[in-house]
Image (cartoon, rainbow, N blue to C red):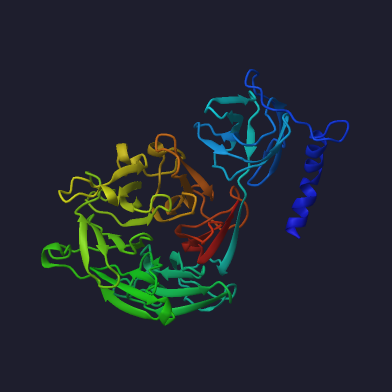
Amino acid sequence: MRKLKQIALFMPLLVCFIYGCSNKKGDVAVMPFDPSQPIEVTSFFPDSGGIATQMIINGNNFGTDTTGLRVYFVDSLGVRHPGGVVSSNGNKIYLAVPKLTYLTSLDIVVERTDANGNVYSGTIENSPFKYKTQIAVATIIGQATDQHEIPTVQGSFTSCKLSSPTFLTLDDEDNLFITERTLEVGPWARNANGLVDHGGYAGNILLADSKKEEVIVLKYLNWEPLNAPTFNDDPGNEAIYLPEDEMGGYLQLRKAANYTIKKSSMLFTEEGDPFKSQRNWKHCLAANKQDKMLYTIMYRGELIRINPRTRQSEVLIKNVLPERNNIKGERGSDNFYVFSPIEPMVMYVVLRHYNMVRRIDLTKITPDGDYTGEDYAGLSITEGPQAGKGWEDGPLKMAKFDTPWQLAFTADGKLYIADSGNHCVRVIDTTVSPDQAVVNTAVGVPGSPGFRDGGPDQALFNYPSGVAVNSDGSELYVADHKNHVIRKLAIQ
């Protein structure tokens, strides 16, 4: 039905284009490109739209041969996004709008490259195209509530209850795995002796079956807080890996064993053991699709590689943290990270206690330890974690974050970050050079906790902590921690 509506909507545009392509005798006009004349862009229709919107660009000297003909949507940073050119009759180009950025005002540039590599272009002044990002936020799992002591109860997507959904990952069949833990310790989370008492409200592992639309509690763990999981697609050893807080412990849930839970631990040589001299912990694991290894970054800053088949582990970098204290006045951070789908050996790392993002290229690691990563996003890079705390969109090193947690990539290089303290989800297009890339708010109203489904400017979240992207990159899942639900963003 949706496709029929789209065809009906765009039929007048197609008829208009076909009519414009014909001469009075009904023959298709041939209007070759003339390099001695300028390319002129006079108008386009419609003047706004989202991904796959059908457009007609009017003008002169486009040429009818689409070989070498390009249409670019150019954002305010000068980044050129190629449109999907379908055909041209010389003075009309028929095309589809590409998936663009969150910079919504774009110039249209028509460009032609001849057989000798000469480039000719034309644009229309003061008539930007208005890009409309189409994002719909819907609650798909759980029942929204602002109460604290909610026990986890399995059931259908709509009938189940979640105590503290925190971190997410998806397997290769788009089944969603949810780990629950208490992020903030208030009076409700303490027993009579003043000690933290999870009491069944944290430390749980859940599987949300995408086909049956059911949530299954794989294990109530209570006293064992768990962190950000990852799925490793190692052939024959596909598994979910869940990091425990302390030391080198983690859980393995192999797909071939129906995701039964097995406890494991990192194995080190005595010289390479990062737990010998001081207390240390971790909050995330990341599987690398290229080498099938697991990676983790400890609170004290050690980057560790783990062989999931043998458990043998080694410290690759002794400290990836900035050369300054964190927001608590000490060296250390809870860290969350993911590998880029565009550069498979590059990790993007959120440093929660620094309110910033770093970038680590594993191919640059040397035995002498000189390489420790690169600063990427956050005002904290130059001004420190306290001055960098808050909300501000804009160029990478001018943007502010407030207690960012889990992050996830779409296949086309968009990095989504659960910016918990700002109650929103941020996005960065990592395919854009760092001097031009920006941090944008994808969904949520910064500084306004609440619960509401709807469009990107209307949806409200309350401390979103986890994010995960499905296999084709069209849907983003968000663990809306203090609303006790899982939300879904359809990205177009």
Q: Position of residue 305 (x, y in %)?
A: 26, 61
User: Residue 26's image quarter?
Assistant: top right
Q: Position of residue 412 (x, y in %)?
A: 49, 50
User: Residue 297's image quarter?
Assistant: bottom left
Q: Is residue 268 above or below residue 364?
A: below
Residue sitting farthest toward the right: 25
Residue sitting farthest toward the top: 36
Residue sitting farthest toward the front: 115
Q: Please tell me which residue is depicted at 49% across the width and 54% down the height of the picture.
A: 410
Q: Nearer the viewer, residue 5 or 83?
A: 83
Q: Is residue 306 above or below residue 126?
A: below
Q: Please tell me which residue is depicted at 56% across the width and 66% down the height of the picture.
A: 144
Q: Nearer the viewer, residue 22 or 353?
A: 22
Q: Please tell me which residue is depicted at 55% across the width and 38% down the height of the picture.
A: 81
Q: Position of residue 282 (x, y in %)?
A: 28, 63
Q: Position of residue 115 (x, y in %)?
A: 56, 30
> Does residue 259 appear in the picture of this structure?
no
Which quarter of the rendering shows the N terminus? bottom right
Marks counted in the figure total 0
